[in-house]
Image (cartoon, coloured by chain):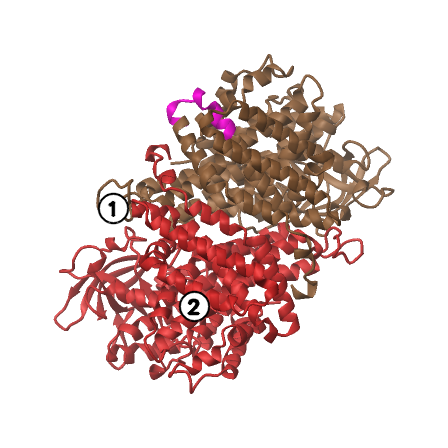
Chain colours: A brown, B red
Amino acid sequence: MNYQAPLKDMQFLLKDVFAAEAEWQRMPAMEETLDLDTANAILEEGARITAELIAPLNRPGDEQGVRHIEDQVLAPDGYQQAYATFAESGWVGLGGDPEYGGMGMPKMLGVLFDEMCYSASNAFTLYASLTAGAALCISSHGDEAQKALYLPKLYSGEWAGAMDMTEPQAGSDLRNVRTKAEPMDDGSYRITGTKIFITGGDHDLADNIVHLVLARLPDAPAGSRGLSLFIVPKYQVTEQGQLGESNGVVCGSVEHKMGIKGSATCVMHFEQAQGYLLGKKNRGLIAMFTMMNYERLSIGIQGLGCAEASYQMATRYAKERQQGQGGSASLGGESDPILVHADVRRMLMTNAALTEAGRALAVMTGLQLDKVKYGAAVDPEADMLVGLLVPLCKAFFTDTGLESTVHSQQVFGGHGYIRETGVEQWVRDVRIAQIYEGTNGIQALDLLGRKVMPKQGAALKLLMQMLDDTLSVLPANYAGYGDKVAQAFDQLLDGAMALKARDGQADVVNAAAVDYLHALGYATYGLMWLKILVALPQADEELAARKRHLAQFYFERLFPRFNAYLTAALVDASVTQEMPAALF
Amino acid sequence: MNYQAPLKDMQFLLKDVFAAEAEWQRMPAMEETLDLDTANAILEEGARITAELIAPLNRPGDEQGVRHIEDQVLAPDGYQQAYATFAESGWVGLGGDPEYGGMGMPKMLGVLFDEMCYSASNAFTLYASLTAGAALCISSHGDEAQKALYLPKLYSGEWAGAMDMTEPQAGSDLRNVRTKAEPMDDGSYRITGTKIFITGGDHDLADNIVHLVLARLPDAPAGSRGLSLFIVPKYQVTEQGQLGESNGVVCGSVEHKMGIKGSATCVMHFEQAQGYLLGKKNRGLIAMFTMMNYERLSIGIQGLGCAEASYQMATRYAKERQQGQGGSASLGGESDPILVHADVRRMLMTNAALTEAGRALAVMTGLQLDKVKYGAAVDPEADMLVGLLVPLCKAFFTDTGLESTVHSQQVFGGHGYIRETGVEQWVRDVRIAQIYEGTNGIQALDLLGRKVMPKQGAALKLLMQMLDDTLSVLPANYAGYGDKVAQAFDQLLDGAMALKARDGQADVVNAAAVDYLHALGYATYGLMWLKILVALPQADEELAARKRHLAQFYFERLFPRFNAYLTAALVDASVTQEMPAALF
């Protein structure tokens, strides 16, 4: 049986935990067009298309991989037709600008569809995700002509998108970008340089590929403030949107990777390619950053999607596979399904308790993005929360995603190591999500140094305000869990301020960041479980019973990790910094 | 540059931490033949052969994999010649019985060579490891004729070995083994059945493959006490050791796996194959178990080997790759090698602090095995320590091995996800070591239920006695670390006794086991770091400085995990057991 989207859980989050309809009523762009019934219908159709159209391509695509034959980059068999159907149904443009053919749906809904897509197939979904990302960037920074020319084609899937940032010498450190942009008399630019690790850099799913390329103008200042962003299509495009000649955009090679083998990761050469400035000169990184919050959240959700898909495989197996005799859960026969064993349950419940809290946090973060983008008024608090939550989601969803997929694989015993079983693919695929779109280490630096520490922890205090609101309506029988979370946030705030007061900030932040992020992750998942517990009276009994068990498991067995991470984060940076390089 | 064995560290452990020479002097089989100079010469030659002969085969073998062509199973190119050289040099028989051509070296030394081999190539090493394992089993349980017939050929590498236990319906639960053994008039047996996941079940590295097959006699009692062990060669063998006809041992298929792709994992069909009883009737499992402690320790060491090899790759990269500017460790240029960044150091030091403690524990466990096997008198304490430490080593080395290889991969950023870089292979390869030779969950059940809980924690108290001995000579400036470890062991003992006192032992042990094993792992690694600190005055300054930094890192940043694991282990089993199966 293929993946089936956890629709009931998703609908519970929208309706009961986050009161989506009331939120949408407060957004002028949504109040007329979106209600819960519509949202549910979209999710149901999303569940159908991901189960029926995409999931069946996942394993074969992993086996076949991307082929690079005589200058052509070919996605795995079946991708082309499925992508056409997917895009024609409007899914690439789900969050796109309605003025140019997008569906204008909020991110709060989009995160749930993102998760379904990643659960069905990481590799397939990346083609759509990069295209939606490029469209969002053009939508935010393009002029009218650029929007009219590119957006409808991207939303419809006729053209695809790619983001070209990394270069061999410029990975985490984009100051070193060397790709050049020379101005031409007609107002366009000639782009020359080499980019690496370009997801969807070339493929056969669309007629054209619209590259957004980070490059340097001749008179640009050195460093990251001298980078500009350019639209560089694979084939030249007339003002009417007709395709012209090749544009000097050449795929040099396709990488062989640990996973996401159906996704084309390309080395791209730009050879005097014609490009068009997107946004302002020398402000390319800032333009990238506005969309980066959406992309980073999506990549975080890749972690949730892998965890959920692997959970479904592992629970099915645990209910069928008979080995050993259980204790209290034994069915009394010669052998029991392995689900009776507490250790198997531990692995599955760890996955579920992490993934379901993560899904709630994804919806909440989507809501903050929507408040910023669609709110009736400027919302600085939502903006601050987006800044805090996005790097947390990106890194924590994917780090816990690795743990969860490993647990799922472990449930299968030896069978989990065999490719045909399918579960090992999730372990290989999820690893890239911890690395790309800014490594999780980079996310942690951003989180602690730029989001938590400034303004006396103002962003963290917003989360703590949410916690107070939740505690005020928390049923008394969960007060013990509430106390744990409240105490954790107090320690996080004190800890961040203590770190900030130390000398040598670069070292201090760098040494503490990843452990601090994990500590904040466990505290925030605690908050999510409290919010879920508060909403349980509205849920049906089956869903409520499952959530109560998972919440208990979370607080009793996983939450103790919080202290280990926070304690490690607060250790003096000298412990890492004083070991001489020669001793490594 | 290829892998280079950490010789200095290995020699420090033998000489200074565990006083190997004095131990060998107390073993009649060793006192004349083995001193430190000989051991060092063996390690140096081992370092040379692993770096020059084996390591270069690792990446190509992963790409090419095992081929199954027209009933022939072919190991990757280059394996055949390398295996011949390896075996002819005596390495397969390193720990083998000298009476039959083995070198008779102790396991205390063997574990270090094992680690080198796994660091060079998991897949290659498995062929030798299974052969040595089969030889050990024949050496322990075979009669004179069997030993004379098989051991010289196995040690010399002319023949290879394989262990055939698992069947489709009998994985962790060997009670369900169905393979049949019918007695024949000549005293031999006809073996019929199918075995799966047989490492080295068929290949072209040796002229014959000696299968040790777990099967059931017609009159055998049901369950695991009705299993007997049989020698079943691929080709029939005359009493003079000449090869005869095929023996009904057929490789049905070769598995496609996540990793160890150069190792042939086979489905084996036994079709009325002629077999010979090894050891006593219906005592097959017990015969297997005597060698299992060696095999399990070796597979644990696979985890250390992967961690070390990936550490070497990652540190080299971190010293070369320039991105960003560092804090206190900055070299002052435009960009620094990424080793200046505290988070990169955190990842590398986590790997090193875990791996070096693991290496010490492997040597200590090897010593206990040697005391049991070679000691002048029966040594029940060593025997009890073996029972306790082997499942701990197997599971904890491989679980921390996964964490360590993931850190190493993460240091490479995007490059770490590319197959050509080589580091991702360690992540894929190490995963099997958490699964096979008894999953780590099974190891944990054995550890907690059968080794820690019985006799009021007598085995744990032996470790605590070692700790007391170490504390009595620990320099005063490390007393804080000593206190942490002592407190941890007290909590472990109290915790185990509290668990034992609860009702419903099957559930209690199953729910607690893995977290308990991890808690014991962190405490025991703490003990290892104390033992290393005690020995530092004998080390050269460079080695001592590195160890001091790593010990500090271990106690400050990693040891806090102990509490998280022990707390989780002591949670009531109802938290996992009360969730109804239908809600999973």
Q: Residue at x 56, y 55 (%)?
A: B419
Q: CA distance from mark 1 to mark 2?
A: 35 Å
> Which label number is shown at residue B365?
2
Q: Residue at x 66, y 26 (%)?
A: A382
Pointer 1 indicates a residue of which chain?
Answer: A
| Quadrant hosting residue A316 | top left
Q: Residue B571 in the image: state x and y as whole percent.
A: 41, 43
Whether residue B397 is visible here, answered yes or no, is yes
Q: Residue A500 in the image: state x and y as whole percent.
A: 72, 43
In the displayed structure image, the side of residue B570 where residue B315 appears, left or right: right
In the displayed structure image, the side of residue A115 where residue A223 appears, left or right: right
Residue to which mark 1 is pinned: A335
Give the SS element for disc 1: loop
The local crowd at label 2, few if under 14, some if 14 to 19, many if 20 or more residues have their Cα within 10 Å, is: many
Amino acid type, label 1 = Ser
| Quadrant hosting residue A452 | top right
Q: Residue B47 in the image: state x and y as whole percent.
A: 54, 74
Quadrant including the N terminus of chain A: top left
The magenta region covers A530-543
**What secondary structure is the magenta-colored segment mainly?**
helix
Q: Nearer the viewer, residue B385 or B271?
A: B385
Give the SS element for disc 2: helix
